[in-house]
Image (tube, rainbow, N blue to C red):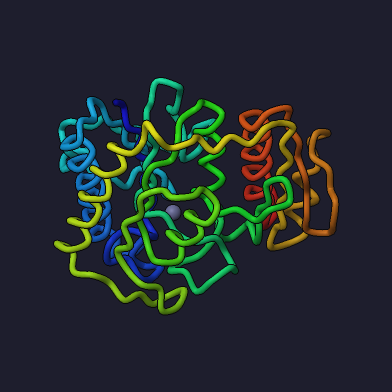
Amino acid sequence: MKVFLSVDMEGISGVAVSNHVSPEHKEYERFRKLMTADANAAVEGAVSAGATEVLVVDSHGPMTNILIEELDSRARLISGSNKYYCQMEGIDGSFGAVFFVGYHAREGASDGVLNHTLLGRTVYELRCNGKPVNEAILNAGIAGDHGVPVALVTGDDQVCAETREALGDVEAAVVKRAVDRFTADCLPLERSRALIREAAARAVERAPRLRPYHVPGPVTFEVDFKGTAEAHMAAVFPFVRRVGPRTVAVTGENYLEAFRLLWGTLIIARASAAGVI
Ligand SMILES: [Zn+2]
């Protein structure tokens, strides 16, 4: 079985505050090593349960966080951020399971550690067919269009609860308890990595019996931005409907098409939040 491993950073073992995940801050160098170690724990668990191939997709910020020199040699790595499918670049129907490692809760729904949705400075809330989604649920729909189930989520207690509520009984490794958006009660690293390894192995074993999260078309995404400028400039595209002062909507015939319209819209919105030039 091939495993697709999308790795974000806010839900990595030990991460509690923004400085830990911001390349400009000196603390970041410590935490990108921890990010690579959590990814390795998932690779090790997957391979121990029979995974034959693992694709790791760096899915945080500039998407160049994972240290390839420390990555398990049984995995390949997609590094870099110019991608049509963002945190899901490279997914196709040849994979048997999707893992979300180091994920975080959506903005505003809980005290989840570093809770935000996709672009923290730009997006206030993102809805798929009217329902607010976090990044795991958003990305599960992309995998679902390829017929691939989500089998594992790792992060704090809040992201694991949100994701299981939406996707059903996927494996979860809770590596920390959210105290506040900027405070976490963290397990020691040895224990959290063991949890990830064990959950990853169970996820590979259970994946053939899990149902892909398929959202039938047409699919509509609505975005509430933090400001009005983002909504104003996103509507430069005729396919973007401005449905409120800070809200736009896009509709695609199927999930993959809708996601691409959404992602393009978000890129324009972010670029214009403080003036295009
Ligand atoms: Zn992130």
Q: Residue at x 54, y 48 (%)?
A: 137
**Residue 99 in which image quadrant:** top left
Q: Is residue 190 left or right of residue 224?
A: left
Picture layout, residue 228 above or below residue 51:
below
Give the camera-side residue of 122 and 96. 96
Q: Which residue lies furthest to the top in this view?
A: 94
Report the number of numbered marks: 0
Can the viewer see residue 23 in this picture?
Answer: no
Q: Position of residue 127 (x, y in %)?
A: 68, 51
**Residue 157 in which image quadrant:** bottom left
Q: Residue at x 38, y 26 (%)?
A: 95
Give the camera-side residue of 49 and 120. 49
Q: Position of residue 187 (x, y in %)?
A: 23, 70
Q: In this view, does 70 lie to the left or right of 179?
A: left
**Residue 43 in which image quadrant:** top left
Can the viewer see residue 231 in this picture?
Answer: yes
Locate the N terminus and report the quarter of the image it occupies: top left
Q: Which residue is drawn at 43% across and 27% down?
A: 90
Q: Residue at x 80, y 50 (%)?
A: 232
Give the camera-side residue of 107 and 268. 107
Q: In this view, does 108 lie to the left or right of 95?
A: right
